[in-house]
Image (cartoon, grey):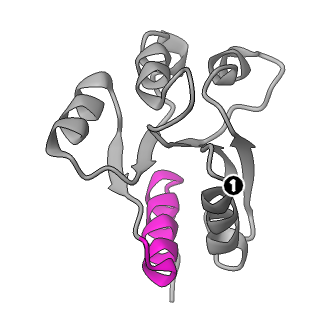
Amino acid sequence: MAEGLVLVVEDSEDDMEAVARALARSHPLVRLEFAGRADGVLGRLLDPAAERPRLVLLDLNLPGYSGHDLLGDLRAHPELAGLPVVVFTSSTAPAEVDACYAAGADSYIFKPLNFELFRTVLGSTVDFWLGEVRSG
């Protein structure tokens, strides 16, 4: 079963709750850390005393320092090169998708509005990036 720390960079309280609810039962060994803003995340990831997450789920539409800004800054640090960053956002614009991949995103996933589909997509994403495939 997938386990480890996942850092969720998301400013929407509703989406934070949805992520927590979606993974609570299906992924009990996954620990979630939430950051409501992108500023401060880079320093947290570079802090040698802090646990390094195994995955970052990144919303793009954040106040101030955006998800785009954070993604570019993360990829500018070689010590974070192996950290998977999955853009998990509501934008389906092809230019947005292309820009994220060009900036170094490992994956780009559209947040479904239907909660069951949201749970399925998020669970599959976590399984893939944490290197585990759940049975059943």
Identify which residue is drawn at 33% across, 47% down: 108
What main secondary structure does the magenta stretch of the protein show? helix
**Residue type for callout 1:** Glu
Q: Position of residue 35 (x, y in %)?
A: 70, 38
Q: Measuring from the top left, give residue 61's x and y in whole percent.
A: 46, 38
Q: How many marks?
A: 1
Tell me if I can see residue 71 in this picture.
Answer: yes
28 sits left or right of 77 in the view: right
On screen, 36 above or below 131? above
| Residue 115 falls inside the magenta stretch | yes
Q: Is residue 112 magenta?
A: no
Instruction: Give the x, y percent position of residue 73.
Output: 47, 14
Identify residue for label 1.
13
Q: Residue at x 40, y 26 (%)?
A: 68
- Does 3 sit left or right of 91 as displayed? right
Q: What is the secondary structure assignment of the residue under circle 1?
A: helix
Please state the horizontal and vertical placement of residue 136, each as a whole percent of the image: 51, 89
Image: 50 above or below 76: below
The residue nearer to you, when weighing 1 against 61, is 61
Relative to the observer, which residue lies in front, 32 or 19?
19
Classify residue 22 as left or right of residue 108.
right
Q: Which region shows up in magenta?
A: 113-132
- Tell me which residue sits at (49%, 55%) in the image: 131
Residue 110 in the image: above or below residue 136:
above
Q: Nearer the viewer, residue 47 or 19?
A: 19
